[in-house]
Image (cartoon, rainbow, N blue to C red):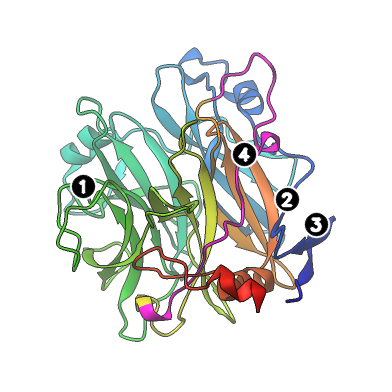
């Protein structure tokens, strides 16, 4: 079979991608590190940070009519907790301007809350840090921020919180999307055909029965749907629509939503992450899936590529020799932005340490989902290597 290739371009950074090499890494990576942030935050030793990674992204138009790219990045500060900072670029590639103070810190009584929420619960739940924010555009200039909140006293207890902003300055907290242990929530940017808002959730499936399987699942090996009449909830957890496989797969151990879905002519484009267990650790890779535009939660209409679009390499964490590296062999995205002529800019963390960007092409990603077909509910390959001989 012939292999397609296509051009990608973002503000002067351009090149060719193909089904064999579906992303083009920016030669200026990393685009933001702890060193640039510490030049701004470093006057307060309590905010000295060791990482900049896993950023939610948005493209907004300023009062002058010019487009700006907003990055809400995660940083580990000196005491081990994570906070969320904000940086702005005019071209989405370089010259990032970091705000003088973090954008989102663990909640206190002085923050702004929606009416009726349990403020004490939010404060308790966020005391261990806030991280991995997704910026979900939901229309009318509103963005729902979904982010992980870590409990200070209970190890690994995490809930996903919601907050709303319209100007990336003021944030109104709405509390947890669910009190269930959960990670990585993304919201589709418009309601479905039944006027319901749809989300992709990654609840901890350990200890609960996996629907239809008759056995107990592992930890974070499934992606479920969520439904609500409003993007700020209340949210109801729906059915499993994706599961990790148990064979030779980059997504063998765990999977989870990555960037909020983007609307394309091929369907809703969803960049997700997957984990594989190896003797040398647990590398994180990025995968691609398309959901049906009319019925995004129907597993029979979901197309997944068994081939990852991005796997970790030495070039994804270029740091000084004395720099701290948080988690080796990880690429992880919380945000992707559409560009011209099918170009997709994927913003991703390298080794949970630095921020990078790479370009992909929507048509190539669609072809991957047709060539490397994967069953969304079992993780099994839907193509045979015998086909190569025919």
User: As rendered, which of 193 and 27 lies closer to the eye?
Assistant: 27
Q: CA distance from mark 4 to mark 3?
A: 18 Å
Residue 310 part of the magenta segment: yes
Mark sitting earlier along the chain (2/3): 3
Nearer the camera: disc 2 or disc 3 = 3
Q: CA distance from mark 2 to mark 1?
A: 43 Å
- Which residue bears the numbered disc 3? 11
Horizontal side of 286 relative to 236 (left or right) equals: right
Q: CA distance from mark 1 to mark 4?
A: 31 Å
Magenta span: 300-325
- SS for dot 2: loop
Q: Is residue 67 above or below residue 325?
A: below
Mark sitting earlier along the chain (3/1): 3
- Which residue bears the numbered disc 1? 206
User: Which of the image's four quarters has the N terminus?
Assistant: bottom right
Residue 123 falls in image quadrant = top left
User: As rendered, which of 360 and 254 lies closer to the eye?
Assistant: 254
Residue 390 point in image, percent of width and height: 65, 79
Mark sitting earlier along the chain (4/3): 3
Marks 2 and 4 close (CB-CB < 8 Å): no
Q: Please tell me how crowded label 2 is: few (under 14), some (14-19), or many (20+) other residues with Cα within 10 Å.
A: some
Residue 314 falls in image quadrant = top right
- SS for dot 4: strand
Task: Name the residue at 38% across, 47% down.
Answer: 253
User: As rendered, which of 188 and 165 lies closer to the eye?
Assistant: 188
Marks 1 and 4 close (CB-CB < 8 Å): no
Nearer the camera: disc 4 or disc 3 = 4
């Amino acid at each position: 079979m012939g292999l397609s290739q296509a051009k990608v371009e973002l503000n002067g950074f351009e090149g060719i991608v193909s089904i064999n090499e579906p992303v083009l890494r920016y030669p200026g990576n990393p685009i933001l590190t702890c060193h640039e942030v510490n030049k701004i935050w470093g006057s307060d030793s309590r905010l000295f940070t060791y990482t900049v990674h896993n950023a939610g992204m948005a493209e907004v138009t300023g009062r002058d009519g010019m487009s700006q790219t907003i990055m809400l990045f995660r940083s580990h500060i000196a005491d081990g907790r994570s906070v969320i900072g904000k940086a702005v670029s005019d071209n989405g590639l370089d010259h990032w301007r970091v705000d003088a103070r973090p954008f989102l810190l663990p909640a206190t009584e002085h923050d702004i809350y929606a009416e009726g929420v349990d403020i004490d619960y939010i404060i308790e739940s966020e005391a261990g840090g806030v991280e991995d924010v997704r910026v979900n555009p939901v229309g009318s200039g509103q963005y729902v921020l979904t982010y992980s909140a870590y409990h200070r006293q209970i190890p690994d207890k995490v809930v996903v919180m919601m907050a709303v902003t319209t100007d990336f300055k003021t944030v109104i907290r709405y509390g947890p999307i669910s009190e269930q242990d959960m990670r990585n929530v993304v919201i589709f940017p418009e309601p479905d055909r039944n006027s319901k808002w749809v989300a992709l959730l990654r609840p901890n499936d350990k200890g609960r029965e996996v629907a239809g399987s008759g056995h107990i699942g592992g930890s974070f090996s499934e992606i479920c749907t969520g439904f609500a009449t409003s993007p700020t909830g209340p949210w109801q957890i729906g059915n499993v629509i994706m599961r990790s496989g148990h064979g030779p797969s980059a997504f063998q151990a765990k999977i989870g939503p990555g960037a909020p879905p983007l609307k394309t002519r091929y369907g809703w484009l969803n960049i997700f992450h997957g984990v594989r267990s190896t003797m040398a650790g647990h590398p994180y890779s990025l995968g691609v899936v398309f959901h049906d535009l009319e019925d995004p939660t129907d597993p029979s209409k979901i197309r997944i590529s068994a081939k990852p679009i991005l796997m970790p390499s030495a070039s994804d964490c270029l740091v000084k020799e004395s720099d701290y590296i948080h988690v080796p062999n990880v690429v992880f995205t919380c945000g992707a932005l559409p560009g011209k002529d099918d170009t997709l800019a994927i913003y991703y963390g390298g080794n949970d340490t630095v921020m990078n960007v790479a370009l992909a092409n929507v048509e190539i990603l669609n072809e991957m989902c047709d060539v490397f077909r994967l069953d969304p509910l079992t993780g099994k390959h839907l193509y045979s290597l015998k086909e190569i001989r025919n």
